[in-house]
Image (cartoon, rainbow, N blue to C red):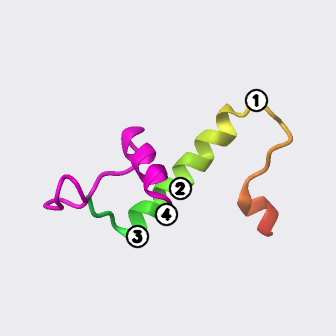
């Protein structure tokens, strides 16, 4: 993940840095990043306006 993606997800409320991490170099848990990626992807699916979009799970199975 790029730092700008992480920053965007934090701004949108998908994730928070680990408590006690420095303000200028926030630290995130890997599980939180994975969960934020899923939340962002689901939000993109909901707002895409296209019935043709499918989830990654549907493509994998």
Magenta-span inclusion, residue 5:
yes
* 55 over 13 or under it: above or below: below
Rendered image: mark on residue 49: 1
> What percent of the width, then of the height, locates residue 38?
56, 55
> What element does badge 2 sit on?
helix
Residue placed most toward the observer, 52 or 5: 5
> What element does badge 4 sit on?
helix
What is the span of residues highlighted in magenta in the rendered image? 1-25
Q: Residue at x 18, y 52 (%)?
A: 23
> What percent of the width, then of the height, locates residue 43?
59, 40
> What percent of the width, then of the height, locates residue 53?
80, 44
Q: Are marks 3 and 4 in contact (CB under 8 Å)?
A: yes
Q: In terms of sequence position, does the residue under pointer 1 or pointer 4 come before the other?
A: 4
How crowded is the residue under tag 1: few (<14 C-alpha within 10 Å), some, or many (20+)? few
What residue is pinned by disc 4? 34
Q: Are marks 2 and 4 in contact (CB under 8 Å)?
A: yes
> What percent of the width, then of the height, locates residue 18?
23, 61
What residue is pinned by disc 3? 30
Query: In the image as oriented, which residue stretches furthest toward the left?
Result: 20
Q: In 3D space, how far apart are the residues under numbered discs 1 and 4 (Cα atoms)?
A: 24 Å
* 23 over 20 or under it: above or below: above
Q: In 3D space, how far apart are the residues under numbered discs 1 and 3 (Cα atoms)?
A: 30 Å
Q: In 3D space, how far apart are the residues under numbered discs 3 and 4 (Cα atoms)?
A: 6 Å
Q: Residue at x 27, y 56 (%)?
A: 17
> What element does badge 3 sit on?
helix
Q: In 3D space, how far apart are the residues under numbered discs 3 and 2 (Cα atoms)?
A: 11 Å
How crowded is the residue under tag 2: few (<14 C-alpha within 10 Å), some, or many (20+)? some
What residue is pinned by disc 2? 37
Q: Residue at x 26, y 58 (%)?
A: 26
Q: In terms of sequence position, does the residue under pointer 1 or pointer 3 come before the other?
A: 3
* 2 over 4 or under it: above or below: below
Q: Residue at x 64, y 40 (%)?
A: 44
């Amino acid at each position: 993940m790029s730092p700008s993606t992480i920053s965007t997800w934090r701004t949108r409320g998908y994730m928070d840095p680990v408590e006690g991490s420095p303000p200028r170099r926030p630290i995130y848990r890997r599980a939180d990043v994975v969960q934020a990626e899923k939340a962002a992807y689901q939000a993109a699916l909901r707002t895409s306006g296209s019935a043709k979009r499918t989830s990654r799970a549907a493509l994998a199975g």
